[in-house]
Amino acid sequence: MKNLIALSLLLAQWVVSSSAASQQPLHDAALSSTSSLLELHKSLVEIPSISGSERNVSTFLIKYLESKNFTVKSQPVSETRENVLAYIGPSPKAMVLVTSHIDTVPPFWPYERKEDEIWGRAVESRLQSSEIAEGDVGLLFVVGEEKGGEGMKKVNDLRLSWESVIFGEPTELKLASGHKGGMGFTMKAKGKAGHSGYPELGKSATLMLVRALAALDGLDLPSSEKYGNTTVNIGRIEGGVAENVITEDASAIVSIKVAAGSPAEIKEVVEKAIYKSCPDIELAFTLGTGPISIDHDIDGFETAVMNYGTYISSLKGNHKRYLYGPGTILVAHSDHEHLSISDLEEAVEGYKTLILESLKT
Ligand SMILES: *[C@@H]1O[C@H](CO)[C@@H](O)[C@H](O)[C@H]1NC(C)=O
Ligand SMILES: *[C@@H]1O[C@H](CO)[C@@H](O)[C@H](O)[C@H]1NC(C)=O
Ligand SMILES: *[C@@H]1O[C@H](CO)[C@@H](O)[C@H](O)[C@H]1NC(C)=O
Protein backbone atom coordinates (compact mmCIF):
# COMPACT_ATOMS: atom_id res chain seq x y z
CA MET A 1 0.00 0.00 0.00
CA LYS A 2 2.97 2.28 0.29
CA ASN A 3 3.00 2.50 -3.45
CA LEU A 4 -0.34 4.28 -3.08
CA ILE A 5 1.20 6.77 -0.68
CA ALA A 6 4.09 7.37 -3.05
CA LEU A 7 1.60 7.81 -5.86
CA SER A 8 -0.35 10.33 -3.82
CA LEU A 9 2.84 12.25 -3.18
CA LEU A 10 3.60 12.18 -6.86
CA LEU A 11 0.15 13.64 -7.43
CA ALA A 12 0.97 16.19 -4.76
CA GLN A 13 3.95 17.25 -6.82
CA TRP A 14 1.78 17.51 -9.88
CA VAL A 15 -0.90 19.48 -8.04
CA VAL A 16 1.52 21.93 -6.53
CA SER A 17 3.59 22.28 -9.68
CA SER A 18 0.46 23.03 -11.67
CA SER A 19 -0.61 25.66 -9.21
CA ALA A 20 0.61 29.08 -8.21
CA ALA A 21 2.10 27.71 -4.99
CA SER A 22 5.25 26.71 -6.80
CA GLN A 23 7.72 29.38 -7.61
CA GLN A 24 9.79 27.00 -9.68
CA PRO A 25 9.68 26.89 -13.46
CA LEU A 26 7.81 23.76 -14.57
CA HIS A 27 10.78 22.16 -16.24
CA ASP A 28 12.99 22.38 -13.16
CA ALA A 29 10.23 21.01 -11.01
CA ALA A 30 9.94 17.99 -13.30
CA LEU A 31 13.65 17.31 -13.25
CA SER A 32 14.01 17.55 -9.51
CA SER A 33 10.97 15.35 -8.99
CA THR A 34 12.68 12.48 -10.80
CA SER A 35 15.34 12.01 -8.18
CA SER A 36 13.12 13.07 -5.31
CA LEU A 37 10.63 10.40 -6.29
CA LEU A 38 13.29 7.72 -6.00
CA GLU A 39 14.20 9.09 -2.60
CA LEU A 40 10.54 9.11 -1.76
CA HIS A 41 10.04 5.42 -2.46
CA LYS A 42 13.10 4.51 -0.55
CA SER A 43 12.24 6.60 2.49
CA LEU A 44 8.68 5.34 2.59
CA VAL A 45 9.61 1.71 2.22
CA GLU A 46 12.21 2.01 4.95
CA ILE A 47 9.76 3.39 7.51
CA PRO A 48 7.68 0.71 9.22
CA SER A 49 4.03 1.70 9.49
CA ILE A 50 1.99 -1.26 10.63
CA SER A 51 -1.41 -0.20 12.03
CA GLY A 52 -0.89 1.44 15.40
CA SER A 53 2.61 2.77 14.74
CA GLU A 54 2.18 5.08 11.77
CA ARG A 55 3.68 8.14 13.46
CA ASN A 56 7.01 7.92 11.64
CA VAL A 57 5.33 7.84 8.26
CA SER A 58 3.03 10.72 9.07
CA THR A 59 5.98 12.78 10.31
CA PHE A 60 7.69 12.08 7.02
CA LEU A 61 4.57 13.01 5.02
CA ILE A 62 4.11 16.28 6.89
CA LYS A 63 7.70 17.37 6.32
CA TYR A 64 7.56 16.36 2.71
CA LEU A 65 4.26 18.08 1.92
CA GLU A 66 5.35 21.23 3.73
CA SER A 67 8.53 21.29 1.71
CA LYS A 68 6.29 21.30 -1.38
CA ASN A 69 4.47 24.38 -0.07
CA PHE A 70 1.29 22.59 0.92
CA THR A 71 -0.51 23.79 3.98
CA VAL A 72 -0.52 20.72 6.20
CA LYS A 73 -2.81 19.97 9.06
CA SER A 74 -2.52 16.90 11.24
CA GLN A 75 -5.48 15.48 13.09
CA PRO A 76 -4.73 13.31 16.12
CA VAL A 77 -6.64 10.01 16.04
CA SER A 78 -5.04 8.60 19.17
CA GLU A 79 -2.03 9.53 21.28
CA THR A 80 0.45 8.15 18.77
CA ARG A 81 -1.42 8.36 15.48
CA GLU A 82 -2.63 11.13 13.23
CA ASN A 83 -4.38 11.77 9.95
CA VAL A 84 -2.68 14.21 7.60
CA LEU A 85 -4.59 16.71 5.45
CA ALA A 86 -2.75 18.82 2.86
CA TYR A 87 -4.04 21.63 0.67
CA ILE A 88 -2.87 24.64 -1.29
CA GLY A 89 -3.28 28.06 0.28
CA PRO A 90 -4.86 29.07 3.57
CA SER A 91 -8.22 27.28 3.33
CA PRO A 92 -8.75 23.51 3.69
CA LYS A 93 -11.83 23.77 1.47
CA ALA A 94 -11.33 21.91 -1.81
CA MET A 95 -13.48 20.59 -4.64
CA VAL A 96 -11.72 17.25 -4.89
CA LEU A 97 -10.10 15.17 -2.19
CA VAL A 98 -7.64 12.39 -2.96
CA THR A 99 -7.21 10.00 -0.07
CA SER A 100 -5.15 6.96 0.80
CA HIS A 101 -4.25 5.30 4.04
CA ILE A 102 -0.98 5.44 5.89
CA ASP A 103 -0.92 2.12 7.64
CA THR A 104 0.30 -0.93 5.81
CA VAL A 105 1.08 -4.54 6.04
CA PRO A 106 4.75 -5.01 5.27
CA PRO A 107 5.28 -3.90 1.67
CA PHE A 108 7.66 -5.06 -0.95
CA TRP A 109 8.15 -2.69 -3.82
CA PRO A 110 11.35 -3.40 -5.70
CA TYR A 111 12.56 -0.79 -8.11
CA GLU A 112 15.49 -0.38 -10.37
CA ARG A 113 17.47 2.61 -11.36
CA LYS A 114 16.01 2.70 -14.86
CA GLU A 115 12.63 3.56 -13.45
CA ASP A 116 13.53 7.13 -12.78
CA GLU A 117 13.58 7.83 -16.50
CA ILE A 118 10.04 6.54 -16.78
CA TRP A 119 8.87 8.49 -13.78
CA GLY A 120 10.61 11.60 -14.98
CA ARG A 121 8.83 11.44 -18.30
CA ALA A 122 5.49 10.72 -16.71
CA VAL A 123 5.75 13.66 -14.38
CA GLU A 124 7.06 16.05 -16.98
CA SER A 125 4.27 15.40 -19.46
CA ARG A 126 1.78 15.90 -16.68
CA LEU A 127 3.20 19.17 -15.55
CA GLN A 128 2.73 20.77 -18.89
CA SER A 129 -0.88 19.81 -19.20
CA SER A 130 -3.03 21.64 -16.76
CA GLU A 131 -3.56 24.32 -14.20
CA ILE A 132 -4.80 23.54 -10.74
CA ALA A 133 -5.99 26.39 -8.59
CA GLU A 134 -6.13 26.98 -4.88
CA GLY A 135 -9.23 25.29 -3.53
CA ASP A 136 -9.24 22.59 -6.20
CA VAL A 137 -7.50 19.60 -4.66
CA GLY A 138 -6.80 18.39 -1.16
CA LEU A 139 -4.84 15.34 -0.11
CA LEU A 140 -5.71 13.22 2.87
CA PHE A 141 -3.72 10.44 4.47
CA VAL A 142 -5.61 8.46 7.07
CA VAL A 143 -4.44 6.01 9.70
CA GLY A 144 -6.08 2.85 10.90
CA GLU A 145 -7.61 1.51 7.70
CA GLU A 146 -6.38 -2.03 8.06
CA LYS A 147 -7.97 -2.22 11.49
CA GLY A 148 -11.49 -0.85 11.77
CA GLY A 149 -11.11 2.40 9.82
CA GLU A 150 -11.12 4.70 12.85
CA GLY A 151 -8.90 7.24 11.06
CA MET A 152 -11.49 7.86 8.36
CA LYS A 153 -14.32 8.10 10.89
CA LYS A 154 -12.35 10.81 12.68
CA VAL A 155 -12.12 12.88 9.49
CA ASN A 156 -15.84 13.65 9.86
CA ASP A 157 -14.91 15.78 12.90
CA LEU A 158 -13.11 18.20 10.59
CA ARG A 159 -16.53 19.22 9.24
CA LEU A 160 -15.19 19.65 5.73
CA SER A 161 -16.98 18.71 2.55
CA TRP A 162 -15.88 17.97 -0.98
CA GLU A 163 -17.60 17.62 -4.33
CA SER A 164 -15.68 14.44 -5.10
CA VAL A 165 -13.49 12.11 -3.10
CA ILE A 166 -11.08 9.75 -4.82
CA PHE A 167 -10.14 6.76 -2.66
CA GLY A 168 -6.90 4.99 -3.50
CA GLU A 169 -7.10 1.22 -3.29
CA PRO A 170 -5.82 -1.52 -5.57
CA THR A 171 -8.51 -1.94 -8.26
CA GLU A 172 -6.28 -3.18 -11.09
CA LEU A 173 -6.68 0.26 -12.67
CA LYS A 174 -10.41 -0.22 -13.04
CA LEU A 175 -12.95 2.26 -11.79
CA ALA A 176 -14.91 0.45 -9.12
CA SER A 177 -18.66 0.49 -9.69
CA GLY A 178 -19.29 -0.90 -6.25
CA HIS A 179 -18.03 -3.31 -3.67
CA LYS A 180 -19.52 -6.06 -1.58
CA GLY A 181 -20.65 -5.27 1.92
CA GLY A 182 -19.21 -6.94 4.95
CA MET A 183 -20.25 -8.37 8.26
CA GLY A 184 -18.85 -10.88 10.68
CA PHE A 185 -19.41 -12.85 13.81
CA THR A 186 -17.65 -14.82 16.48
CA MET A 187 -18.77 -18.23 17.72
CA LYS A 188 -18.02 -19.40 21.23
CA ALA A 189 -18.63 -22.91 22.44
CA LYS A 190 -18.59 -23.63 26.15
CA GLY A 191 -18.16 -27.31 27.02
CA LYS A 192 -17.16 -29.19 30.13
CA ALA A 193 -13.58 -30.40 30.62
CA GLY A 194 -12.82 -34.00 31.43
CA HIS A 195 -10.55 -36.92 30.62
CA SER A 196 -10.88 -38.13 27.05
CA GLY A 197 -11.47 -41.67 28.31
CA TYR A 198 -14.76 -40.61 29.94
CA PRO A 199 -16.61 -38.57 27.33
CA GLU A 200 -19.92 -39.10 29.11
CA LEU A 201 -18.65 -36.97 32.02
CA GLY A 202 -17.70 -33.97 29.91
CA LYS A 203 -18.91 -32.00 26.93
CA SER A 204 -16.63 -31.24 24.01
CA ALA A 205 -16.56 -27.61 22.94
CA THR A 206 -14.60 -28.49 19.80
CA LEU A 207 -17.30 -30.92 18.73
CA MET A 208 -19.93 -28.22 19.27
CA LEU A 209 -17.86 -25.81 17.21
CA VAL A 210 -17.32 -28.28 14.38
CA ARG A 211 -21.06 -28.94 14.13
CA ALA A 212 -21.83 -25.24 14.10
CA LEU A 213 -19.15 -24.53 11.48
CA ALA A 214 -20.38 -27.37 9.28
CA ALA A 215 -23.76 -25.64 9.15
CA LEU A 216 -22.09 -22.76 7.31
CA ASP A 217 -21.19 -24.95 4.36
CA GLY A 218 -23.75 -24.61 1.61
CA LEU A 219 -25.92 -21.96 3.29
CA ASP A 220 -28.46 -20.37 0.99
CA LEU A 221 -27.38 -16.73 1.11
CA PRO A 222 -28.53 -13.90 -1.16
CA SER A 223 -26.77 -13.15 -4.45
CA SER A 224 -27.17 -10.47 -7.09
CA GLU A 225 -26.24 -10.03 -10.71
CA LYS A 226 -24.00 -7.07 -9.96
CA TYR A 227 -22.16 -8.36 -6.90
CA GLY A 228 -22.29 -12.14 -7.35
CA ASN A 229 -22.55 -14.51 -4.38
CA THR A 230 -22.49 -13.69 -0.71
CA THR A 231 -19.48 -15.62 0.57
CA VAL A 232 -18.48 -16.92 3.97
CA ASN A 233 -14.94 -17.24 5.31
CA ILE A 234 -14.08 -19.11 8.49
CA GLY A 235 -11.00 -17.05 9.25
CA ARG A 236 -9.79 -18.52 12.49
CA ILE A 237 -10.64 -21.35 14.83
CA GLU A 238 -9.27 -22.02 18.28
CA GLY A 239 -9.81 -24.52 21.00
CA GLY A 240 -8.53 -27.34 23.14
CA VAL A 241 -5.44 -28.04 25.24
CA ALA A 242 -4.29 -31.63 24.60
CA GLU A 243 -5.33 -34.80 22.83
CA ASN A 244 -6.48 -36.51 26.02
CA VAL A 245 -8.55 -33.65 27.42
CA ILE A 246 -12.18 -32.94 26.57
CA THR A 247 -12.20 -29.37 25.30
CA GLU A 248 -13.86 -26.82 27.53
CA ASP A 249 -13.57 -23.80 25.24
CA ALA A 250 -13.53 -23.37 21.48
CA SER A 251 -14.18 -20.39 19.25
CA ALA A 252 -14.16 -19.22 15.66
CA ILE A 253 -14.16 -15.92 13.78
CA VAL A 254 -16.15 -15.75 10.56
CA SER A 255 -16.49 -12.99 7.99
CA ILE A 256 -19.13 -12.65 5.31
CA LYS A 257 -18.89 -10.62 2.09
CA VAL A 258 -22.39 -9.46 1.36
CA ALA A 259 -23.53 -9.47 -2.28
CA ALA A 260 -27.22 -8.72 -1.73
CA GLY A 261 -29.74 -8.18 1.00
CA SER A 262 -29.05 -6.67 4.38
CA PRO A 263 -26.70 -7.89 7.10
CA ALA A 264 -29.71 -8.29 9.38
CA GLU A 265 -31.38 -10.73 6.95
CA ILE A 266 -28.17 -12.70 6.56
CA LYS A 267 -27.72 -12.84 10.31
CA GLU A 268 -31.12 -14.47 10.59
CA VAL A 269 -30.28 -17.16 8.02
CA VAL A 270 -26.93 -17.87 9.69
CA GLU A 271 -28.37 -18.02 13.20
CA LYS A 272 -31.13 -20.36 12.16
CA ALA A 273 -28.73 -22.80 10.48
CA ILE A 274 -26.21 -22.76 13.32
CA TYR A 275 -28.71 -23.08 16.14
CA LYS A 276 -30.30 -26.01 14.34
CA SER A 277 -26.97 -27.88 14.37
CA CYS A 278 -25.79 -26.63 17.72
CA PRO A 279 -28.39 -24.90 19.90
CA ASP A 280 -26.12 -23.85 22.75
CA ILE A 281 -23.34 -22.05 20.92
CA GLU A 282 -22.87 -18.35 21.55
CA LEU A 283 -22.90 -15.98 18.55
CA ALA A 284 -21.92 -12.30 18.50
CA PHE A 285 -22.42 -10.40 15.25
CA THR A 286 -20.88 -7.21 13.87
CA LEU A 287 -23.42 -6.18 11.28
CA GLY A 288 -21.45 -3.88 8.96
CA THR A 289 -23.07 -2.95 5.64
CA GLY A 290 -24.73 -4.35 2.55
CA PRO A 291 -23.15 -3.81 -0.88
CA ILE A 292 -21.90 -0.27 -1.54
CA SER A 293 -22.53 1.33 -4.92
CA ILE A 294 -19.74 3.65 -6.13
CA ASP A 295 -19.74 6.44 -8.72
CA HIS A 296 -18.17 5.42 -12.02
CA ASP A 297 -19.49 8.09 -14.37
CA ILE A 298 -16.12 9.07 -15.82
CA ASP A 299 -15.31 7.92 -19.33
CA GLY A 300 -12.22 6.04 -20.36
CA PHE A 301 -12.09 3.48 -17.56
CA GLU A 302 -12.97 -0.16 -17.45
CA THR A 303 -15.30 -0.68 -14.49
CA ALA A 304 -15.56 -3.59 -12.09
CA VAL A 305 -17.05 -4.68 -8.80
CA MET A 306 -14.63 -5.27 -5.93
CA ASN A 307 -15.07 -8.20 -3.57
CA TYR A 308 -13.43 -6.48 -0.63
CA GLY A 309 -14.81 -3.91 1.76
CA THR A 310 -13.42 -0.42 2.18
CA TYR A 311 -13.75 2.50 4.57
CA ILE A 312 -15.37 4.76 1.94
CA SER A 313 -18.76 4.78 3.62
CA SER A 314 -17.11 5.96 6.86
CA LEU A 315 -16.63 9.39 5.31
CA LYS A 316 -19.98 11.14 5.60
CA GLY A 317 -21.24 13.67 3.06
CA ASN A 318 -22.87 14.06 -0.33
CA HIS A 319 -19.66 13.87 -2.31
CA LYS A 320 -19.18 11.69 -5.34
CA ARG A 321 -17.01 8.72 -4.47
CA TYR A 322 -14.47 7.12 -6.73
CA LEU A 323 -12.38 4.06 -5.95
CA TYR A 324 -9.33 3.51 -8.08
CA GLY A 325 -5.72 2.40 -7.95
CA PRO A 326 -2.99 0.22 -9.40
CA GLY A 327 -2.28 -3.30 -8.25
CA THR A 328 -4.51 -6.15 -7.31
CA ILE A 329 -6.03 -6.98 -3.96
CA LEU A 330 -5.01 -10.58 -4.62
CA VAL A 331 -1.46 -9.81 -3.57
CA ALA A 332 -2.14 -6.77 -1.39
CA HIS A 333 -1.71 -8.63 1.87
CA SER A 334 1.00 -11.02 0.78
CA ASP A 335 4.77 -10.80 0.78
CA HIS A 336 4.87 -10.44 -2.99
CA GLU A 337 2.97 -7.16 -3.11
CA HIS A 338 4.45 -5.25 -6.00
CA LEU A 339 3.53 -3.19 -9.01
CA SER A 340 4.83 -2.86 -12.49
CA ILE A 341 6.13 0.49 -13.60
CA SER A 342 3.68 0.67 -16.48
CA ASP A 343 0.83 0.19 -13.99
CA LEU A 344 2.17 3.05 -11.92
CA GLU A 345 2.39 5.27 -14.96
CA GLU A 346 -1.14 4.42 -15.93
CA ALA A 347 -2.31 5.02 -12.38
CA VAL A 348 -0.89 8.54 -12.30
CA GLU A 349 -2.66 9.17 -15.59
CA GLY A 350 -5.86 7.69 -14.17
CA TYR A 351 -5.81 9.79 -11.01
CA LYS A 352 -5.11 12.86 -13.07
CA THR A 353 -8.13 12.14 -15.29
CA LEU A 354 -10.33 11.58 -12.23
CA ILE A 355 -9.19 14.84 -10.66
CA LEU A 356 -9.57 16.93 -13.79
CA GLU A 357 -12.94 15.43 -14.73
CA SER A 358 -14.18 15.95 -11.18
CA LEU A 359 -13.12 19.59 -11.35
CA LYS A 360 -15.19 20.06 -14.51
CA THR A 361 -18.50 19.16 -12.94
C1 LIG B 1 7.74 27.38 -1.92
O1 LIG B 1 7.50 28.77 -1.78
C2 LIG B 1 8.70 29.51 -1.62
C3 LIG B 1 8.31 30.96 -1.30
O2 LIG B 1 7.22 31.38 -2.07
C4 LIG B 1 9.55 29.38 -2.88
O3 LIG B 1 10.74 30.09 -2.73
C5 LIG B 1 9.87 27.91 -3.12
O4 LIG B 1 10.56 27.72 -4.34
C6 LIG B 1 8.59 27.07 -3.13
N1 LIG B 1 8.97 25.66 -3.15
C7 LIG B 1 8.44 24.78 -4.01
C8 LIG B 1 8.91 23.37 -3.88
O5 LIG B 1 7.65 25.09 -4.88
C1 LIG C 1 10.34 5.89 14.57
O1 LIG C 1 11.54 6.61 14.43
C2 LIG C 1 12.33 6.66 15.60
C3 LIG C 1 13.49 7.60 15.36
O2 LIG C 1 14.07 7.41 14.10
C4 LIG C 1 12.77 5.22 15.92
O3 LIG C 1 13.55 5.21 17.10
C5 LIG C 1 11.53 4.37 16.15
O4 LIG C 1 11.88 3.02 16.37
C6 LIG C 1 10.61 4.44 14.94
N1 LIG C 1 9.33 3.79 15.28
C7 LIG C 1 8.88 2.74 14.58
C8 LIG C 1 7.57 2.18 15.03
O5 LIG C 1 9.48 2.26 13.65
C1 LIG D 1 -22.28 -18.53 -7.09
O1 LIG D 1 -22.66 -19.73 -6.52
C2 LIG D 1 -23.18 -20.67 -7.45
C3 LIG D 1 -23.72 -21.85 -6.68
O2 LIG D 1 -22.81 -22.26 -5.71
C4 LIG D 1 -22.08 -21.05 -8.42
O3 LIG D 1 -22.55 -21.95 -9.37
C5 LIG D 1 -21.59 -19.80 -9.11
O4 LIG D 1 -20.51 -20.09 -9.96
C6 LIG D 1 -21.19 -18.74 -8.11
N1 LIG D 1 -20.94 -17.49 -8.80
C7 LIG D 1 -19.80 -16.82 -8.67
C8 LIG D 1 -19.70 -15.55 -9.43
O5 LIG D 1 -18.87 -17.21 -7.97
Image (cartoon, rainbow, N blue to C red):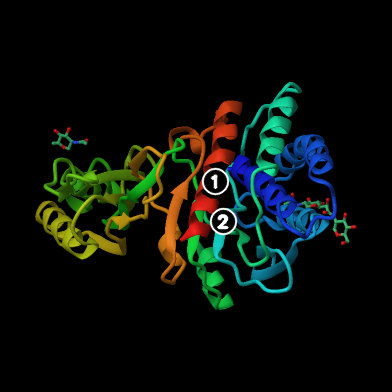
Under mark 2, the amino acid is Val
Q: Is residue 223 left or right of residue 74?
A: left
Name the residue located 69 percent from the left edge and 48 percent from the top edge: 14
> Who comes first in sequence, dot 1 or dot 2?
2
Question: In front here: 180 or 163?
Answer: 163
User: What residue sits right under mark 1 in the picture?
Assistant: 351
Query: Relative to 37, is 272 above or below?
Result: below
Q: Kindly identify which numbered label has been placed on residue 298.
A: none
User: What residue sits right under mark 2 in the picture?
Assistant: 98
Name the residue located 48 percent from the left edge and 41 percent from the top edge: 170
Q: Is residue 104 left or right of residue 113?
A: left
Task: Please identify the quarter of the rendering in which residue 159 is found.
Answer: bottom right
Check contact, mark 1 vs mark 2: CB within 8 A: yes
Q: Is residue 66 left or right of residue 54?
A: right
Quadrant field for ligand 3: top left
Question: In front here: 312 or 251?
Answer: 312
Percent position (x, y) of residue 287?
Answer: 30, 64
Under mark 1, the amino acid is Tyr
Real-space CA distance between mark 1 and mark 2, rounded to the nearest whole angstrom = 9 Å
- Secondary structure, mark 2, is strand
Query: Relative to 259, is 303 above or below?
Result: above
Percent position (x, y) of residue 91?
Answer: 68, 74
